[in-house]
């Protein structure tokens, strides 16, 4: 049986960001039969230019997304929106289609977060990603829910994250079954 591959993308390039901390927490909760790989190249993606061939950093991102069975995103909110580096990376995939029908989980972890969450859901919709409502979560006031080590200390939040993970893995499994049925 093939091991399920999930690509984890933090919307922040800061290593100590709350979004990255939440993804690290997610990694500890992922079942052992699932490979959970962190994407580290967000800061190396150049500004989107639809008139040029995709640079190597963009090709690497596209390949990682294409090879993954699902993508797990956790992002902060900057200036009431999606961080520019994350949106820019997604812009590079709009015409190449790596997110088309790809199962995606989204957690927005911010002080507020509702505007970035809604905006990113629209972007993922435009990319025709497979985002189910149960695989999304808005965690407002994230800093009050993390301990000094960056671990989620709030039990309700931790339980909500676990539900997102379970739903997301179920979506991936259902997608794989549908693809097998087509063969």
Image: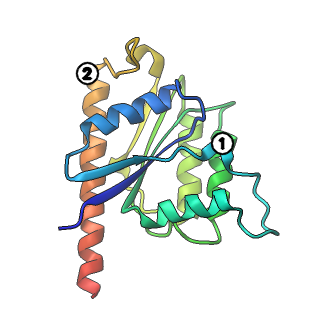
Which residue is most to the bottom?
A: 183
Q: Whole-percent x and y of residue 167?
A: 27, 50
Question: In what element is the residue under mark 1?
Answer: helix
For residue 163, which numbered disc appears in the image?
Answer: none
Any part of residue 46 in sight: yes
Name the one closer to the observer, 176 or 122: 176
The N terminus lies in quadrant: bottom left
Q: Is residue 104 left or right of residue 3?
A: right
Name the one closer to the observer, 168 or 69: 69
Any part of residue 141 in sight: no
Dot 1 corresponds to which residue? 43
Identify the residue at image location x=65%, y=39%.
83
Name the one closer to the observer, 132 or 104: 104
Circle nearer the N terminus (2, 1)? 1
Identify the residue at image location x=52%, y=68%.
98
The C terminus lies in quadrant: bottom left
Count of numbered tags: 2
């Amino acid at each position: 049986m093939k091991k399920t591959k999930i690509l984890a993308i933090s919307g922040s390039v800061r290593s100590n960001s709350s979004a990255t901390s939440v993804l690290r927490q997610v990694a500890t909760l992922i079942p052992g039969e699932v490979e959970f790989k962190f994407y580290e190249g967000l800061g190396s993606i150049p500004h989107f230019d639809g008139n040029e061939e995709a640079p190597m950093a963009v090709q690497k991102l596209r390949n990682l997304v294409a090879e993954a069975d699902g993508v797990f995103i956790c992002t902060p909110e900057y200036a009431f929106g999606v961080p520019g580096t994350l949106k820019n990376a997604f812009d590079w995939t709009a015409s190449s289609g790596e997110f088309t029908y790809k199962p995606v989980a989204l957690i927005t972890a911010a002080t507020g977060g509702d505007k970035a969450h809604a905006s990113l859901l629209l972007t993922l919709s435009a990319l025709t990603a497979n985002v189910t409502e149960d695989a999304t979560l808005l965690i407002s006031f994230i800093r009050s829910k993390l301990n000094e080590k960056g671990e989620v200390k709030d039990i309700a939040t931790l339980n909500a994250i676990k539900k997102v993970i379970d739903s997301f893995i179920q979506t991936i499994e259902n997608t794989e079954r549908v693809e097998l049925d087509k063969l």
